[in-house]
């Protein structure tokens, strides 16, 4: 039986662990943190990601955790006037699956439980990985090691495995904005309970979308230089200042959010690259494709990697090299395309060229949903489950 070591118990690593375990691969998962405590409040799992979770046997659980998004709207951030509002149904009909925004901690826990929470080795920080003739080996900070036929580095955006596979460190790129995010109780003064509402203006974005349990996942995008100091717990003051002249719905959100649990993330990405495998060692998820969150596809793409990895081992059960080669060739173009699509969207949304951003606001005022849905469908299709 093939043995796989997976480094990183994020949504990519856990999806891969479930996917390989389904094939009968002997899997060991190592995670540096000591408990399930993901950074970030929620993610929107688009239909392609949901299809991957369904494929992993999690259809019922995913639907229970997901918020119901029946419509989408864009709102003028200053006046509060609706620029456009449209149903999600055409999207659902076209791709055959409803998307689900899901609280991150709950998504993680669902995946961990599906794999076997107690089988995850927490508190194990990988400090080195190397290949050998018969096995690849990982070394941990506590001095222990493990070896396997393959090592999957699902160790996130600052991946050490990526450094090994590419032969050196890479420079990630600051995308020009900071994202504040968290969860609040649904309040229809901010937006309808089953709508993804986005306020736009001044190259900024304020958004709410429902997750299960009568909560909104919210985020604020604020263009600013990299490295501006921030003290955790001060999000309300910072946002009240940044959005002082914005519409009442935004003020309600700022008043309701919990500053203690509001996250602040500087957004970076990485130019796509095509080498995901070196010998018996491969990267997966953000380690392989680090994107801005502007089309909500980073995590979905990680789930697609997991399914593609499963298909590769299904087709080459006794040949890890052939399987990893098949995995790489199935994924690099698709994942790189999503990174570049997100970067393009990011630039328009956040005022890289203010004229283009102003033109986008004008487009939104005349939008009936057709163009936006076409764009989202373009992101969704093309993965291993199409
Ligand atoms: P991670 O989730 O980063 O997990 C990596 C894991 O590896 C971590 O648990 C870490 O502790 C562990 N690790 C790292 N190094 C080591 C080591 N040396 N030893 C052991 N363990 C290690 N995606 C979407 O699909 N939809 C969205 O709406 C969306 N919104 C986003 C919003 C924001 C603000 C951001 C920043 C991202 C968003 N994403 C979204 C992207 C998504 O969060 C990532 O693509 C996803 O988390 C990648 O999963 P991963 O498992 O590859 O990496």
Image (cartoon, grey):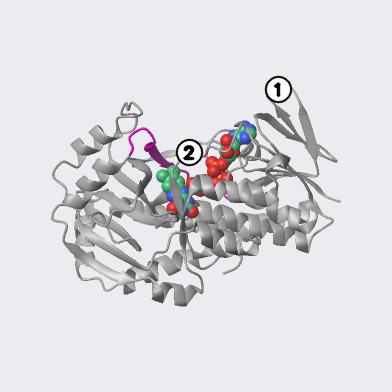
For the question of whether residue 100 can be seen, the reply is yes
Residue drawn 20% across and 64% down?
83
Q: Position of residue 11 (x, y in %)?
A: 58, 48
- Specify the quadrant that holds the C terminus: bottom right
- Is 267 colored magenta in this rendering? yes
Instruction: Please determine whether, in this image, residue 375 is positioned above or below residue 110.
Output: below
Relative to residue 300, is residue 154 drawn left or right?
A: right
Q: Which of the pair 329/95 is nearer the observer? A: 95
Q: Is mark 2 within 8 Å of ligand 1?
A: yes
Relative to residue 107, is residue 92 drawn left or right?
A: left
Q: Cβ–Cβ below 8 Å for labels 2 and 1?
A: no
- Is 181 colored magenta in this rendering? no
Residue 30 numbered mark, or none: none
How packed mark 1 is, by other alpha carbons closer than 10 Å (few <14, some 14-19, many 20 or more), is few
Q: Which of the pair 334/178 is nearer the observer? A: 178
Instruction: Please determine whether, in this image, residue 288 is positioned above or below residue 68.
Output: above
Instruction: Please determine whether, in this image, residue 156 is positioned above or below residue 83.
Output: above
Q: Nearer the viewer, mark 2 or mark 1?
A: 2
Q: Secondary structure at mark 2?
A: loop
Residue drawn 64% across and 64% down?
55
How packed mark 2 is, by other alpha carbons closer than 10 Å (few <14, some 14-19, many 20 or more), is few
The secondary structure making up most of the magenta span is loop
For the question of whether residue 290 can be seen, the reply is no
Q: Secondary structure at mark 1?
A: loop
Q: Position of residue 60 (x, y in %)?
A: 59, 63
- Give, as a single range, the part of the protein colored magenta: 258-275
Where is mark 2, residue-wise? 39
Distance between the alpha carbons at the discs numbered 2 and 1: 24 Å
Q: Which of the pair 217/172 is nearer the observer? A: 217
Where is mark 1, residue-wise? 142
Q: Position of residue 190 (x, y in %)?
A: 25, 54
């Amino acid at each position: 039986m093939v043995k796989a070591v997976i480094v990183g118990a994020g949504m990519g690593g856990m999806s891969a662990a479930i996917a390989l375990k389904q094939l009968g691969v002997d899997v060991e998962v190592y995670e540096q943190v000591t408990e399930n405590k993901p950074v970030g409040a929620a993610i929107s799992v688009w239909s392609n990601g949901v299809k991957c979770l369904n494929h992993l046997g999690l259809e019922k659980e995913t639907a229970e955790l997901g918020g119901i998004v029946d419509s989408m709207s864009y709102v003028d951030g200053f006046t509060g006037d609706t620029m456009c509002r449209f149903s999600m149904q055409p999207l659902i009909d076209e791709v055959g699956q409803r998307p689900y925004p899901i609280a991150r901690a709950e998504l993680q826990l669902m995946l961990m439980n599906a794999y076997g929470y107690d089988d995850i080795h927490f508190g194990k920080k990988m400090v080195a990985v190397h290949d050998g003739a018969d096995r690849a080996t990982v070394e941990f900070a506590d001095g222990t090691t493990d070896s396997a036929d393959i090592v999957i580095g699902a160790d996130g955006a600052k991946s050490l495995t990526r450094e090994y596979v590419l032969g050196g460190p890479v420079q990630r790129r600051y995308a020009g904005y900071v994202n504040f995010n968290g969860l609040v109780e649904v309040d229809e003064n901010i937006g309808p309970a089953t709508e993804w509402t986005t306020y736009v203006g001044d190259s900024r974005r304020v958004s709410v979308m429902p997750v299960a349990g009568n909560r909104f996942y919210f985020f604020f995008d604020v263009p600013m230089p990299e490295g501006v100091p921030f003290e955790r717990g001060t999000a309300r003051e910072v946002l009240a200042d940044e959005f002082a002249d914005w519409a009442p719905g935004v003020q309600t959100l700022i008043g309701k959010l919990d500053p203690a649990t509001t996250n602040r993330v500087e957004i970076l990405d990485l130019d796509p690259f095509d080498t995901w495998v070196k010998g018996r060692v491969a990267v997966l998820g953000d380690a392989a494709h680090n994107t801005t969150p502007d089309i909500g596809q980073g995590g979905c793409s990680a789930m697609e990697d997991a399914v593609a990895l499963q298909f590769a081992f299904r087709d080459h059960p006794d040949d890890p090299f052939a399987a990893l080669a098949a995995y790489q060739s199935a994924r690099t173009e698709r994942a790189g395309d999503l990174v570049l699509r997100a970067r393009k969207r990011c630039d328009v949304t956040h005022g890289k060229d203010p004229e283009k951003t102003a033109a986008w606001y004008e487009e939104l005022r005349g939008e009936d949903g057709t163009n936006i849905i076409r764009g989202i469908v373009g992101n969704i299709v093309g993965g291993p489950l199409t």
